[in-house]
């Protein structure tokens, strides 16, 4: 069997209906901003392989860090043991995060980072003797991962209806998603703030935490919110002694233009969840970082107050090594300046595209550019699938989410590559109405 035949016989892909999905593209090599197929075709990775590859693929400095660590120690259990990479990475994260976000709990991916945060928030109040605080507040349209707790606080995204009976209930707030020249954003924000205040007035002493995707809901459709709104939400919750969890799995490590969205907003959540860009796309790892106040509530003479959670590969030394090197590269390569340049290029392109009949709700933040198509549709709408196929057929990894077309490129992308992607978007929009649904993907 060739590679594709082996894949089809043995692999079970995520978010895939194998009965109807077209064949996957077999990628055998990646470098910089590009993926290379088994046939040698080049694909420009304009979504950073699910938003992970911050510095691009196969960065030579991160490669060295990985190889050097593999020669030293590949793994050691993190219960009862410590190692230099975990300590150094934790110190580095604490130094770049705001406030007293100093206590780093390691896990494996974005979903588990959120799961950890939800459990910590719940147990924090139990340890404080307030066992009535069992409610969580989340926003409509939010996506926080695919484990049970993460699905519960993200059930507003609509992906998990089949598991509804397994999830705990939440209090949902309307999300005031916005875009350039949005005339109704003030009214939407006012409604969301009012809903939060009413909820706190009604049952504030029963609420454990508010969980937020700050500034951008990712899988829910690349939906933006404004800085001042986020600042008000955090302030209202914290003043009511409700813990605030920031899920920065998607927006952390430069995506919004600042290293972290909480820095851009100017606030300090009680817990922050990080993954994806944490290891620059190299290794599966995540962290949930807590304030000293949260951590101290778990300290006592009794093991009952300890946080009884862990993973086999917690704080894996290989993953810690590449994460630490990635953070160093942000400083050494002036990465935030590169992101500012990408943002400027995005804004220039959208200004030219704004009058296109298929473009609505244009928006840009940091390295993220998005717009919506007039035709709605769910995650796997016919239109989004047609566009995805056309982009792949023309050497672009651009994967629309329903009616949302977006770019989130690696930070090493060149102006020429951005222009290639922009031209591809215009050509794809022009071609999509005449495209058959069963277009065969062949990367050019």
Image (tube, helix red, strand yellow):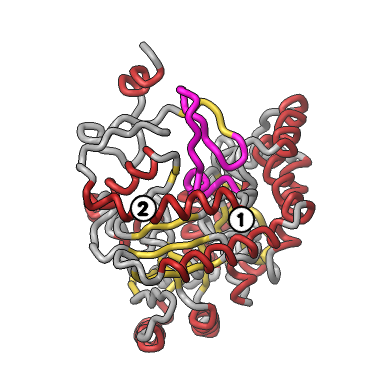
Residue 301 visible in the displayed image: yes
Boundaries of the magenta span: 31-54
Name the residue: 62% across, 57% down.
253
Return the residue at label 1.
302
Name the residue: 55% across, 70% down.
128
Q: Secondary structure beneath disc 2?
A: loop
Q: Residue furthest top?
A: 1
Determine whether, in the image, residue 380 is placed left or right of residue 88. left
Name the residue: 73% across, 49% down.
89
- Along the line of sight, which residue is nearer the eye, 395 or 208? 395
Name the residue: 55% across, 54% down.
304
Q: Secondary structure beneath disc 1?
A: loop
Return the residue at label 2.
400
Residue 256, percent from left and from top: 57, 65
Tell me the quarter of the picture where residue 188 sits. bottom left
Tell which tag, 2 or 1, sits nearer the viewer.
2
Q: Is residue 333 above or below residue 314?
A: below
Q: Quadrant of the C terminus?
A: top left
């Amino acid at each position: 069997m060739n590679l594709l035949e082996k894949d089809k016989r043995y692999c079970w892909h995520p978010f895939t209906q194998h009965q109807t999905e077209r064949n996957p593209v077999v990628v055998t090599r990646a470098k910089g901003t590009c993926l290379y197929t088994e046939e040698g075709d080049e694909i420009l990775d304009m979504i950073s392989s699910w938003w992970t590859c911050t510095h691009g693929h196969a960065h030579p400095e991160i490669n060295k860090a990985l190889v050097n660590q593999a020669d030293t120690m590949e793994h050691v259990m993190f219960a009862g043991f410590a190692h230099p990479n975990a300590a150094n990475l934790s110190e580095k994260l604490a130094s770049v995060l705001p406030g007293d976000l100093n206590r780093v709990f390691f896990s494996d991916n974005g979903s588990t980072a959120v799961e950890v945060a939800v459990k910590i928030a719940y147990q924090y109040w139990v340890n404080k003797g307030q066992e009535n605080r069992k409610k969580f507040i989340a926003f409509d349209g939010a996506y926080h991962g695919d484990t049970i707790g993460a699905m519960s606080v993200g059930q507003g995204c609509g992906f998990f209806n089949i598991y509804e009976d397994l999830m705990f209930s939440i209090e949902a707030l309307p999300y005031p998603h916005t875009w350039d020249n949005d005339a109704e954003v003030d009214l939407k924000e006012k409604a969301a703030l009012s809903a939060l205040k009413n909820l706190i007035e009604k049952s504030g002493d029963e609420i454990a935490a508010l969980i937020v995707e700050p500034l951008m809901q990712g899988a829910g459709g690349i939906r933006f919110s404004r800085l001042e709104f986020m600042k008000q939400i955090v302030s209202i919750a914290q003043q009511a002694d409700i813990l605030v969890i920031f899920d920065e799995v998607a927006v952390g490590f430069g995506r919004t233009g600042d290293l972290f969205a909480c820095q851009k907003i100017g606030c300090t959540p009680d817990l922050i969840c990080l993954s994806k860009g944490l290891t620059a796309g190299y290794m599966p790892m995540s962290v949930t970082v807590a304030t000293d106040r949260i951590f101290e509530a778990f300290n006592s003479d009794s093991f009952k107050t300890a946080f009884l959670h862990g993973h086999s590969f917690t704080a894996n030394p290989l993953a810690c090594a590449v994460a630490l090197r990635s953070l160093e590269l942000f400083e050494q390569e002036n990465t935030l300046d590169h992101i500012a340049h990408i943002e400027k290029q995005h804004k220039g392109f959208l200004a030219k595209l704004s009058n296109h009949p298929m473009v609505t709700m244009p928006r840009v933040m940091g390295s993220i550019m998005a717009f919506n198509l007039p035709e709605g549709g769910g995650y796997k709408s016919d239109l989004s699938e047609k566009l995805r196929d056309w982009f792949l057929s023309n050497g672009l990894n651009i994967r629309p989410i329903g009616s949302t077309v977006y770019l989130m490129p690696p930070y090493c992308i060149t102006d020429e590559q951005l222009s290639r992607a922009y031209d591809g978007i215009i050509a794809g929009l022009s071609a999509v109405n005449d495209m058959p649904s069963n277009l065969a993907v062949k990367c050019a």
